[in-house]
Amino acid sequence: MDLGIRTRAELIAEGLGSSTISKRVSSGRYTRVLPGVYAIGEPTTQARCHAVTRWQPQAVMSHRTAAYLHGWIDIPATIEATVPRSVRMRPPPWLSLVRRDLDPDEIMFDDVMPIVTKEQALFDCIAVMSGDDLDRLVDSHVGNDVDREAMSLVCKRNANRAGAPAARRQLLFRAVGFASEAERVLARAFNERRFSLPSNVWFGGYLVDFIDDRAKVIIEVDGREFHTAANVFRSDRRRQNFLQVRRNHLVLRYAAYDTLCEPSAVADEVIEICRRRRHARR
């Protein structure tokens, strides 16, 4: 893949003199991206990343930039790369350099540049991100394109780094098996309270959102279609009658909107009911 990045040495080798290079920069045909590194025309984000590795051949795309290159997030505001501790170059404002000596098994290559592996990229993101954006990133990728065991090994290898405790918490509390954003945040809330419940489980011929078999409680998170589509409403009434009357399970229903706005309150209420019913069934 040619991203249109050329070093000054390459342009001179192609027969261009210094004055010609300067004229092409002035006319907009070339863009000076970094010292001694040019782009043909206006560089894309990927081209800027490539330019970093041409400027500093030991640089490896990392953190949110690696997450972007792996296809996980939108274009980050700042390009982030990891370079060896010995590198002392001052980057421009759009580039952030993290100085750390990477192991070879922490690096992979795409067509044109080195990138940290997906597991390392996620660990790096955990070290610099927070809030629901980070939770969503972890929940969406661990167990899918990021191997859970490989991620655990990365945490062990980086045990002394600042992001290690947060990474371990993320692996412990991550949501799995969710089918919607509302289910994801509720699963997170359950896990953070050490009250994990199986999600999207087949029970009695129906796929239920969450279930506590010990308490005989089923939790359903209803989207907007539950309130607006007549056929969904009728189907759901039959479903609830079967689960609650014939299978003797209490069915708790929560609107997706309320679950997204107040996941902690919903989780606390569900857990209280489940614990009370577990105690009564002893």
Image (cartoon, rainbow, N blue to C red):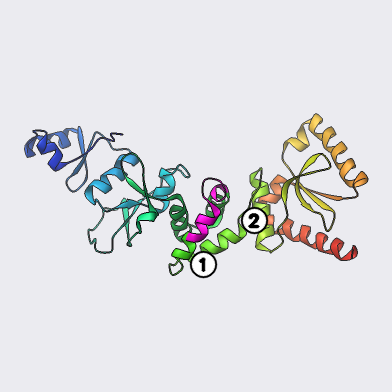
* Between 159 and 173, the one nearer to me in the picture: 159
* Residue at the farthest top position: 231
- Secondary structure state at the residue bearing disc 1: helix
Query: In the rendered image, which quarter is residue 111 located in?
Result: top left
Q: Is residue 163 visible?
A: no
What is the quadrant of residue 49 in the picture? top left
Residue drawn at (60%, 61%) of the image? 172
Q: Is 11 drawn above or below residue 34 in the view shown?
A: above
Residue bearing mark 1 = 165
Q: Is residue 144 magenta?
A: yes
Tell me, yes or no, whether the two marked residues, 1 and 2, touch with CB atoms within 8 Å: no
User: Image check: 158 left or right of 193?
Assistant: left
In the displayed image of the protein, which residue is found farthest to the right? 245
Q: Give percent across and percent down for residue 146.
A: 51, 49
Residue 200 got which mark?
Answer: none
What amino acid is at disc 1?
Pro
Neighbourhood count class around disc 2 (C-alpha, 10 Å): few under 14, some 14–19, many 20 upward? many
Instruction: Name the amino acid, label 2.
Output: Arg
Label disc, if present, on residue 188 of the rendered structure:
2
Q: Which residues are magenta?
A: 140-153
Q: Is residue 13 magenta?
A: no
Which mark is nearer the camera, 1 or 2?
1
Q: Secondary structure at mark 2?
A: helix
Q: CA distance from mark 1 to mark 2?
A: 17 Å
Q: Nearer the viewer, residue 23 or 115?
A: 115
Q: Is residue 141 visible?
A: yes
Position of residue 205 measured from the top left corner of the image (x, y, whole percent): 82, 39
Q: Position of residue 195 (x, y in %)?
A: 72, 61
Say if 31 sits above or below 117 in the image. Answer: above
As displayed, is residue 42 above or below residue 33? above
Q: Nearer the viewer, residue 24 or 172?
A: 172
- Determine whether, in the image, residue 44 is placed left or right of residue 200: left
